[in-house]
Amino acid sequence: MEAYGLGQRLGIATEEASVILDAYFEAFPNVKAYMERTVVEARMRGYTETLFGRRRPIPELSNSNFRIRQAGERQAMNAGIQGLAADIFKVALVRIDEALVERAVASRIVLQVHDEVLVEVPDHEREVVGPLVIGIMRHAAALDVPLEVNVAWGANWADAKT
């Protein structure tokens, strides 16, 4: 996200957002290096690639229009991380579904929304299904950093979110 977009999202001046971004990249220089390296690699190859090997073409990087090239750069910066998150989540969903079937429980996956999975779980299965789902999600991919997973219970999605 650039300063303008951050400013819009936070309701602050673009200049203030720019200061925040500068401080962030100063504190985390490897993030900035990763983003820059990703754009260079995507420009050379014509695509980005997730750790799982899924490729996303980004033809905008070679467009003659500066604004379109900038949009392609932002896509390149985000695609690897967002794509990896999607890959991990898909693996976790498949494994959760398989585990629920293997255990012959009544619980079932109902819905995925972004980085959330809704599982319908009868009260008597909570102690089994809760840790099962959390464990599968935490270990869906071997990464250098741990994946954190939160769980919430409720009669419906809205109740679980509060």
Image (cartoon, rainbow, N blue to C red):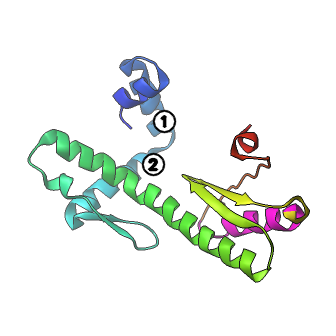
Q: Mark 2–mark 1 contact, CB under 8 Å?
A: yes
Give the residue at mark 2.
31
Residue 64 lies, in percent from the top left, at: 8, 47
Count residues near mark 1 (Cα–Cα under 10 Å), then give few for <14, some for 14-19, many for 20+. Answer: few
Q: Is residue 142 magenta?
A: yes
* Distance from Cα at disc 2 to Cα at disc 1: 9 Å
Residue placed at 70% from the left, 55% from the top?
149
Q: Is residue 145 left or right of residue 59?
A: right
Secondary structure that dominates the magenta span: helix
Check disc 2 and give the amino acid type: Val
The magenta segment is 126-143
Residue 10 lies, in percent from the top left, at: 48, 24
- Circle 2 sits in a helix, a strand or a loop, which is it? helix
**Residue 138 in view (yes/no):** no
Instruction: Residue 79: give its label.
Output: none
Q: Quadrant of the N terminus?
A: top left
Residue 109 lies, in percent from the top left, at: 67, 64
Residue placed at 22% from the left, 59% from the top?
43
| Earlier residue among tags 2 and 1 | 1
Q: Is residue 61 above or below residue 19?
A: below
Q: Is residue 7 left or right of residue 136?
A: left
Residue 13 lies, in percent from the top left, at: 40, 17
Q: Is residue 87 magenta?
A: no
Mark count:
2
Q: Quadrant of the C terminus?
A: top right
Instruction: Residue 24: give its label.
Output: 1
**Residue 137 in view (yes/no):** yes
Q: Is residue 79 left or right of residue 58?
A: right
Residue placed at 43% from the left, 19% from the top?
16
